Image: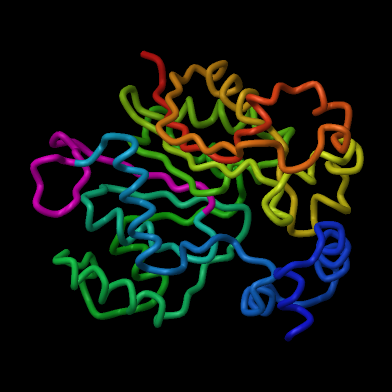
Amino acid sequence: MNLLFSLKQGCPWWIRVGAKIILARFPVPYTVWKHLRLFEHGDMNRPQCAFDTLIEHAQSGAILDGFSLLPRFADNGRQFNVLELGPGDSLFTAIISKVLGASHTWLVDVGPFATKHSDAFIELFDLLRQKGFALPASNSSMLFEDILRDCNAQYLTDGIQSLSQLQAASIDFCFSNAVLEHIPKEDFVQLADELSRILKPGGVCVHRVDFQDHLGGSLNNLRFTDRIWEGLLFRNSGFYTNRIRFGQMKMIFECAGFECSVPRLLRWDRLPISRSKFDSAFSQLTDDDLLIYGCDIVLKRKL
């Protein structure tokens, strides 16, 4: 355990790359890696974090009812539908969205990672009770399937292809938390087009994006050629990001028909590694773009 813990605490980035390439090929269930905190799909499995994240994104999208005593979606008397991209280890968004007034919630991921253990839902229900919300469950069942039914929620696990099951102009609010950077590079334009297709006129997407390398919070992923980084060896080893920088990502969304605003932009004071270390595909980017290591981007479909 001490050796594994040191992998995440103070190891050089190149050791992490090598170790994860090796470890990812062991026939070990994801639940074991998660317990060791070596491979995880975000932290939305913590009830308070899941609640705070959804509320913060909804505030960024200006979709909460300003007259309600408790946080609530401003549905204006019509159906209000929510989509979360990349829910990871929990489907807490389905429950939280329901108590906020959502009519239907879709949760889309690339695999069935979410826990089905009742203890996780009990902890969330306790938190919501403490905050004064009426729980959505019509009975005392803590079964995974019953909770989704009571929340009028669907869990789809075929990635971007799952979005094709959603009707055009059906989503009022879409959000993600540190997910967009993991979308495969060749699929990103398709994702942007699908989000534009399914968003209602006046609907909003809010995405928190982390442009760091996920190897220690730097830009070491920009050292590699596209052939190496996009190859299956690196793609399937638990540290892949698409390396789409802020400027390019914003341009893709604009080309898909979105108006983009950026209420939160995080920058380094200086580049964390020398430009001479970058692959030539990135060495020509401006400092202004490379210094951005995170953002919240709000997307509204042009009418």
Measured from the top left, where is residue 189 in percent x and y?
A: 64, 27
Residue shown at 16% from the left, 64% from the top: 133
Residue shown at 72% from the left, 43% from the top: 272
Query: Relative to residue 68, is residue 140 depicted above or below?
Result: below
Main secondary structure of the magenta stretch: loop
Residue shown at 71% from the left, 56% from the top: 216
Measured from the top left, where is residue 224 in percent x and y?
A: 88, 40
Is residue 27 highlighted in magenta?
A: no
Q: Residue furthest front?
A: 269
In the image shown, does 64 or 191 lie closer to the viewer?
A: 64
| Displayed quadrant of residue 134 | bottom left
In the image shown, does 48 or 88 lie closer to the viewer?
A: 48
Query: Relative to residue 56, is residue 13 depicted above or below?
Result: below
Q: Residue furthest top?
A: 303
**Quadrant, the C terminus:** top left
Query: Relative to residue 117, is residue 63 depicted above or below?
Result: above
The magenta-colored residue range is 65-86
**Quadrant, the N terminus:** bottom right
In the image, is 171 to the left or to the right of 71?
right
Measured from the top left, where is residue 112 in percent x and y?
A: 58, 63
Measured from the top left, where is residue 91 in percent x and y?
A: 43, 62
In the image, is 38 to the left or to the right of 191?
right
Residue shown at 74% from the left, 23% from the top: 285
